[in-house]
Image (cartoon, grey):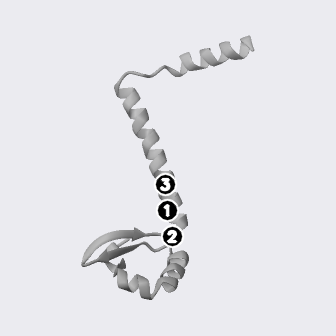
Amino acid sequence: MRYSAQVKPISYLKAHAAEVLQRMGENRETLVITQNGEAKAVLQDVVSFEETQETLALLKLLALGQRDIEEGRTRSAAAVLKGLRTRKASA
C-alpha cells in the first residue's frame, strides 16, 4: 500500500469525517493525517487495527521464544512429553 496517496491535512478530516470513515470501512484504507505539513496521526479501520494488534502479539511471542532459545531456557520435546505423562499418571 502506498501511503503517499493517503495523506490528508487535518482540515480535510474535519470537513469530510463521515465520508472518510465510510471509505475506510469499505476499502480498509489507512489515512495519514498531517498538521502544519507534518505527519501527526494514522487512522485505520477497526478490522485492520485488530489484525495489526494480533500480528504484533504473535511477533512478540516469537521474539520472546527466540530470546529463550538464545539464553538456553529450553527443554527437549521428549522431556516435556515425559513431564506431561508423569503429571497425567499421578492425577
Q: Which residue is mark 1?
A: 49
Q: Are marks 1 and 3 in contact (CB under 8 Å)?
A: yes
Q: Which residue is mark 3?
A: 53
Q: Are marks 1 and 2 in contact (CB under 8 Å)?
A: yes
Among the 4 quarters of the image, the one containing residue 90: top right
Residue 7 position within the rendered picture, expressed as x and y whole percent measured from the top left: 33, 78
Q: Is residue 25 above or below residue 61?
A: below
**Residue occupying the point 64% across, 19% down:** 84
Q: Amino acid at mark 1?
A: Phe
Q: Amino acid at mark 3?
A: Gln
Residue 6 position within the rendered picture, expressed as x and y whole percent measured from the top left: 36, 78
Q: Amino acid at mark 2?
A: Asp
Say which element carries label 3: helix
**Residue occupying the point 46% across, 69% down:** 44
Which quarter of the rendering shows the C terminus?
Answer: top right
The one of 35 and 63 positioned closer to us in this rendering: 35
Which quarter of the rendering shows the N terminus?
Answer: bottom left
Q: Which residue is mark 2?
A: 45
Report, in whole angstroms, how far the alpha carbon at label 3 lies from the one at label 2. 12 Å
Nearest to N terminus: mark 3 or mark 2: 2
